[in-house]
Amino acid sequence: MEIKATMAGTVFQILVAEGETVEKGQTVVLLESMKMEIPIEAEMSGKVKEILVAEGDFVNEGDGLLALEA
Amino acid sequence: MKRILIANRGEIASRIIRTCKKMGLETVAVYSEADKSLEYVREADWSICIGKAPVNLSYLRIDQIIDAALQYDADGIHPGYGFLSENGDFAEKVKEAGLTFIGPKPEILRLMGDKITARKTMANAGIPVLPASSGAVASLSEALKVAKEIGYPVMVKASGGGGGIGMALCRNEKELETNFASLKKKAEKFFANGELFIEKYVENARHVEVQVFGDSYGNVVHVFERDCSIQRRNQKVVEETPSPNLSEAGRERLCQLGVAVAKAIQYENAGTVEFIVDEKENIYFLEMNTRLQVEHGITEAVTGIDIVEWQIRIAKGESIPLQQKEIFRNGHSMEFRIYAEHPNTFFPSPGTIMVLKWGEGQVRIDTGYHEGDSVTPFYDPMIAKCIFHEENRKQCLEAATRFFRTTEWEGIQTNIPLFIELLGNDDFKKGQYTTQLLNKLHRRF
């Protein structure tokens, strides 16, 4: 499944690497939007299959940030 | 100056246009693709699109903005607040293009924009400053050493920071270890300056600032203080003047320190000197905002001074319109910043404003948005400033309570419910509050 941006903003920090195992609820990406940091959490536990964005990219709400596999 | 380009957006662009019209000056608005339907674009005599929605593709494009000014024959540029307002390179390029920058000199913007040199300059001028590292701390180990000497809690700050961004409160070694690297990275990204310094953090402090003006003839006046202690995420949400629960001697000392700061750097135009006031009324210089302040409206309410008009007149080379002894304050004024955000998480809530019916009573509303407008995720989520002016503080609180209870909105979340809660809080009603009040209230909310 894809983890999506909950709001538009700039990708500030990617906190995981491809191949890494993440827990449900873990903050995986920090977005910067409207002068604040928006933490994006993993909606399920799994392994990071692919990172779809780079730090500094501008993303819209709903854009995929990374792909997870169970 | 006959025609002014406003290098900003939303409510502050509207605010500046209003004074320009009063003074018989023409205006040029600049806007991003996301802002083309906002009211300020229509209020200006001319308007020009300067790029796409993200700020680095529009409101931060120095060359594009100067080109727009030249294309439309503007002879002055007002930067508003935020964006390029404190950017020395911008001010210099404006000057090089033969235009007037409505603000201080580029070198003063640079001096005060670097928090480390600003602190040093003020300490050398005899202004009290908080205990801090002597300059930038290069590494975590140095940071830990300095913090141990100063004593926890400490605030780690980005030298290029401001507006509540780029600082972290650390109560112990562990918190400093956790925060140091991420803050450094943040500082590099946001301010293109990774320098961090460490300053003593004062518990139960009040954040009180002084509005000052300087002109090119060496005159300096203060226009009293504003209390800005009601904050979330180190950003102000409510401001008032006079500052409640400050002794008359403390108030006088504070205003005189504001004047001393401006004099120490031969400051020209409008500026705001921010101070920390502790429980014993010790006063420490924090930073200087070298521009029009968001909350300037409460000072205008109690003094009758049009701060934007004074900025323009001083930029034209006039002297400060009034002497210190001719400046008086009447009554009490309070400003509430309305943000499109969740009242309990403080997360932004962009969206379309379906309904916005302001409440009952006398109030000055500075806003860039109206029903049907969209609050886009590209900019600061502040949608309006509601400024109350009454004979005394109690009446201000009553007016604000009635106003917010009768305000209706749909489509976005706002922090108005938090204000209703705040207005019912005993400490706030008594004026006995510090920068911690909103955090305390918020935990219960």
Image (tube, grey):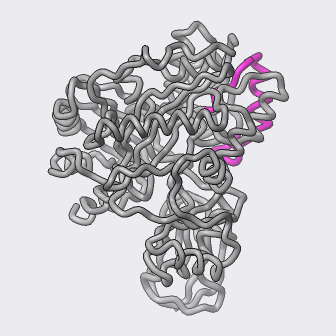
Q: Quadrant of residue B111?
A: top right
Position in image of residue B298 (x %, y %):
37, 30
Note whether B312 is above or below B295 in the view shown.
above
Viewer can see residue B339: no
Residue B218 in view, yes or no: yes
Question: Which residue sits at x=66%, y=71%?
Answer: B137
Give the image location of residue A34, x and y in percent. 52, 52
Q: Quadrant of the C terminus of chain B?
A: bottom left
Q: Is residue B365 magenta?
A: no
From the top left corner, tell me how far across and down residue B192 is, in percent.
72, 58
Q: Nearer the viewer, residue B325 or B375?
A: B325
Image point (46%, 43%), residue name = B375
The reply to whether the magenta stretch includes residue B68 is: yes
Residue B5 sits in quarter: top right
- Expressed as whole percent of the image width and height from the top left, the position of residue B326 reads 43, 14
Identified at 21% across, 28% down, the residue is: B392
**Residue B73, above or below B443:** above
In this view, the residue in front, B327 or B400, is B327
B147 lies left or right of B247? right
Give the left or right position of residue B279, taking residue B51 as reference. Answer: left
Q: Which residues are magenta?
A: B51-79
- Relative placement, left or right, of B255 versus B56 is left
